[in-house]
Image: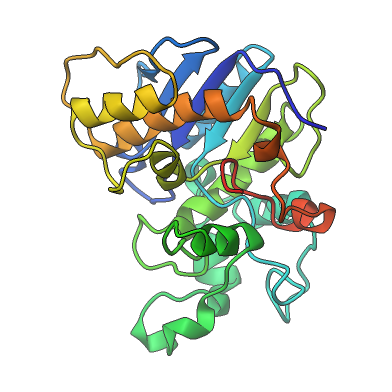
């Protein structure tokens, strides 16, 4: 089933950092049509839990994209964490991460990475050969093969900015959201129901026809928005690349959500959908 139609589109740039994560969390929103996306602000600043509340408060028919991996690789080794008694489906795995990290503030997941399953993560040279830790999901393999570049691995946990810490923190958020919205492709969204999907902002920059990985000026931003049939962004403030990422991605989601092939990529099987998920916009 193809979800939708959607009337509002939200893109979230995520963070798994222990501190200063509010500086990384960035949200853009647009409605159906062709008006330019806008940055969403919170009067007290964003936190991970405030973003959960924000998503839940949106009207039915909202599609939200989160820029983190919704599950670790499974298909390559038949397990998320080989040798461990861990769940074997995405939703059960999110619950497992959440249960282990109750003491980590604001949906953090440092206990999972640094204590409970430390041996599965690469945190530095003392762990040995980094390549031994690197694994990729089916959607990441498809993205790499299409020339998109090398997707990050959730078991590479060096530095707060790595996708690892952001993703496992994000899985706690998915656990909290799964009873309120459909998490694609793990759950089927009913017509008109709100949904959450994984996004990768680099993929949307590519869909817009841009060669670079970062957009730091208004002219390039508006070139990308035009590629998605969006009106130009008219704000006069200086924008960070995190802000341009979500502005471009929100506009891109609005256009791509109308395409059936985006919801049904060739490599997405029922097994992959339940265990690894897929990045919305990779096909």
Q: Is residue 22 left or right of residue 88?
A: left
Q: Quadrant of residue 87?
A: bottom right
**From where the camera sits, is residue 239 visible?**
no
Q: Is residue 93 left or right of residue 142?
A: right
Residue 275 position, x and y percent, is 75, 57
Q: Nearer the viewer, residue 77 or 206?
A: 206
Residue 240 position, x and y percent, is 23, 34
**From where the camera sits, is residue 255 visible?**
yes
Residue beneath the point at 60% across and 41% down: 280
Residue 180 position, x and y percent, is 73, 26
Instruction: Tell me if residue 32 comes above or below residue 148 in the rendering.
Output: above
Of the 4 image quadrants, the one containing the N terminus is: top right
Q: Is residue 72 left or right of residue 193?
A: left
Residue beneath the point at 46% across and 61% down: 151
Residue beneath the point at 51% across and 74% down: 121
Looking at the rendered structure, the number of numbered marks drawn on it comes to: 0
Q: Nearer the viewer, residue 109 or 127?
A: 127
Instruction: Tell me if residue 33 comes above or below residue 162 in the rendering.
Output: above
Residue 148 position, x and y percent, is 44, 56
Instruction: Tell me if residue 39 comes above or below residue 59 in the rendering.
Output: below
Colour theme:
rainbow
Q: Is residue 162 left or right of residue 179?
A: left
Q: Nearer the viewer, residue 60 or 87?
A: 60
């Amino acid at each position: 089933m193809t979800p939708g139609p959607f009337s509002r589109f939200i893109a979230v740039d995520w963070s798994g950092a222990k501190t200063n994560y509010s500086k990384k969390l960035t949200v853009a929103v647009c409605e159906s049509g062709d008006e330019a996306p806008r940055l969403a602000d919170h009067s007290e600043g964003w936190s991970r839990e405030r973003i959960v509340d924000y998503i839940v408060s949106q009207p039915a028919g909202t599609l939200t994209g989160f820029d983190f991996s919704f599950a670790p690789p499974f298909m390559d080794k038949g397990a998320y964490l080989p040798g461990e008694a861990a769940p074997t489906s995405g939703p059960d795995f999110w619950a497992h991460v959440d249960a282990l990290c109750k003491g980590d503030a604001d949906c953090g997941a440092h206990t999972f990475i640094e204590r409970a399953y430390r041996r599965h993560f690469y945190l530095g040279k003392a762990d040995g050969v980094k390549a031994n830790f690197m694994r990729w999901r089916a959607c990441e393999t498809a993205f790499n093969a299409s020339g998109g570049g090398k997707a990050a691995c959730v078991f590479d946990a060096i530095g707060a900015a790595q996708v690892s810490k952001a993703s496992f923190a994000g899985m706690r958020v998915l656990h909290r959201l799964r009873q309120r919205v459909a998490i694609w492709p793990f759950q089927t969204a009913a017509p008109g129901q709100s949904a959450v999907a994984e996004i990768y902002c680099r993929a949307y920059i590519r869909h817009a026809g841009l060669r670079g990985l970062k957009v730091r000026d208004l002219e390039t931003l508006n070139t990308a928005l035009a590629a998605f049939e969006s009106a130009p962004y008219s704000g006069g403030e200086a924008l960070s690349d995190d802000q341009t990422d979500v502005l471009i991605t929100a506009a891109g989601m609005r256009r791509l959500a109308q395409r059936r092939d985006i919801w049904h990529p060739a490599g997405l099987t029922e097994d992959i959908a339940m265990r690894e998920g897929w990045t919305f916009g990779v096909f």
